[in-house]
Amino acid sequence: LTSGLETAWNKLKGEEVLSKENIVEPMRDIRRALLEADVSLPVVRRFVQSVSDQAVGVGVIRGVRPDQQLVKIVHDELVQLMGGEVSELAFAKSGPTVILLAGLQGVGKTTVCAKLANYFKKQGKSCMLVAGDVYRPAAIDQLSILGKQVDVPVYAAGTDVKPSEIAKQGLEEAKKKKIDVVIVDTAGRLQIDKTMMDELKEVKRALNPTEVLLVVDAMTGQEAAALVTTFNLEIGITGAILTKLDGDSRGGAALSVKEVSGKPIKLVGRGERMEDLEPFYPDRMAGRILGMGDVLSFVEKAQEVMRKEDAEELQNKIMSAKFDFNDFLKQTRTVAKMGSVSRVIGMIPGMGKVTPSQIRDAEKNLQNMEAMIEAMTPEEREKPELLAESPVRRKRVALDSGKTEQQVSQLVAQLFQMRVRMKNLMGVMQSGSLPTLSN
Ligand code: GDP
Ligand code: MG
């Protein structure tokens, strides 16, 4: 995946900006790289579409090459695809936290049991393992050995007791001993079958677990997402643990689990040692897939600088009362870019309840303003005084924009009012005190 994506960046070397035309080739490479990494076609389609849209709309950042910008866009989209934030494990409000593990045979369930116990022990929590795989005596022995290794008690009851019964007994025992976290191992099958699902449902009913985690093997690629979906529909799970990531070079399994199943990957296993279990960080995973950490932090810094410079420039203009129609337009377009007016209004505290007609009016108002500003000459936009002084100019703007002279006059007046208001506000913000409302 990493090398496939590199081809994409290389095609942008020498370009000045990202455009609809010059991203066609790189997007094709990205698409191919994702498909080769075993990401499913619908997911790839959505991904490519979203990245293309963002790439074309992205502004130029000084000193940042287009290929670097595309790396950043792809990275952020990968993070989103994998669920954005890290998904923490839940803990029970009272009594022991119960974690039920499910999954096919050989994926690493029993290993994960011990790894999890080790993980919680390091956080100062007491743990107990429950041997719910009763089909092979060897499975119980394996859990006992691993339990000893991490120094955690293992509850086992032999191969002639039903798994749901063992689970219940184990939980009772844990409650008596005031254990913080109970981790229940279960039996897997080579393939999904009804007996396994029924058994899991029964165990789940007996335990009422805090977390039901499906353990999936990263080597199964796209199949991982399908498995998570099926188990979720059948027994209801809270998340997945992706194991054997150390052996998976393609990285495709991690990409589509969240998108396809709606359930997050909560933890990943990267080896056979007890320490090889960690939370799943979408941004680190994306970074690892891209293998370009330096480019990412560089673009982030450049974006930060640009935002700061923009803000400073605006502030200077406001302070010197030079806020003009170009700034006005920039501001209204920023608002438009943030989503519809209704969403922006919804974000302002105390403005929660706005009627749909008020929103429509506000949106219409913005459109009118844009039309009038577009009908102004560059000089008029920079020097609103010209319009304030000349009725002839206002008449021309009205005619060209299809609005009334009165509307143009209002807009000009509004800009001057805004200058005053912004200057006052800026002064207040700099003096650090807020005005008190009087009426
Ligand atoms: P179960 O049948 O689901 O209980 O699977 P096991 O826990 O018995 O694991 C099957 C094999 O996979 C064992 O040999 C483990 O050592 C190995 N294994 C488990 N997790 C990992 C991992 O993250 N990386 C690697 N390389 N091997 C693992
Ligand atoms: Mg096992």
Image (cartoon, rainbow, N blue to C red):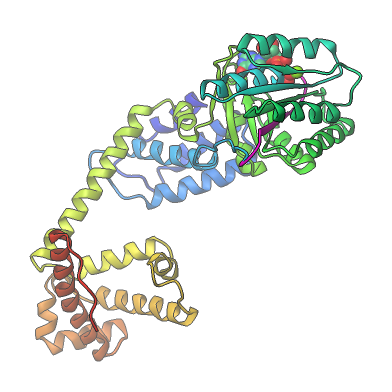
Where on the picture, by quarter, is residue 375? bottom left
Q: Residue at the far front: name it.
A: 176
Start-end of magenta stretch: 93-107
Any magenta on residue 103?
A: yes
From the image, which quarter does the C terminus lie in? bottom left
Q: Residue at x 76, y 36 (%)?
A: 207
Is 288 or 281 nearer to us in this picture?
Answer: 281
User: Is 365 situated left or right of 99 in this image?
Assistant: left
Q: Position of residue 125 (x, y in %)?
A: 56, 25
Would residue 374 appear left or right of 216 to someone viewing this image? left
Indicate whether 259 appears above or below 253.
below
Q: Residue 204 in the image: state x and y as whole percent.
A: 78, 37
Q: Is residue 315 magenta?
A: no
In-image side of 411 versus 107 (left or right): left
Q: Nearer the viewer, residue 434 or 369?
A: 434
Front-most of residues 30 and 14: 30
The quadrant in which residue 68 appears is: top left
Q: In terms of depth relative to the viewer, which is nearer, 277 or 381?
A: 277
Q: Residue at x 11, y 73 (%)?
A: 383
The reply to whether residue 146 is in sight is yes
Residue 277 rendering spot, x and y as whole percentages: 56, 21
Q: Left of 113 or right of it: where is 411?
A: left
Q: Residue at x 82, y 23 (%)?
A: 189
Residue 20 showing in the rendered view: no
In this view, 433 is above or below 191: below
* Residue at far right of view: 160
Q: Quadrant of residue 225?
A: top right
User: Where on the image, by quarter, is ligand 1?
Assistant: top right
Q: Main secondary structure of the magenta part?
A: loop
Task: Classify 291 as above or below 247.
Answer: below
Expressed as whole percent of the image width and height from the top left, the position of residue 399 reads 26, 87
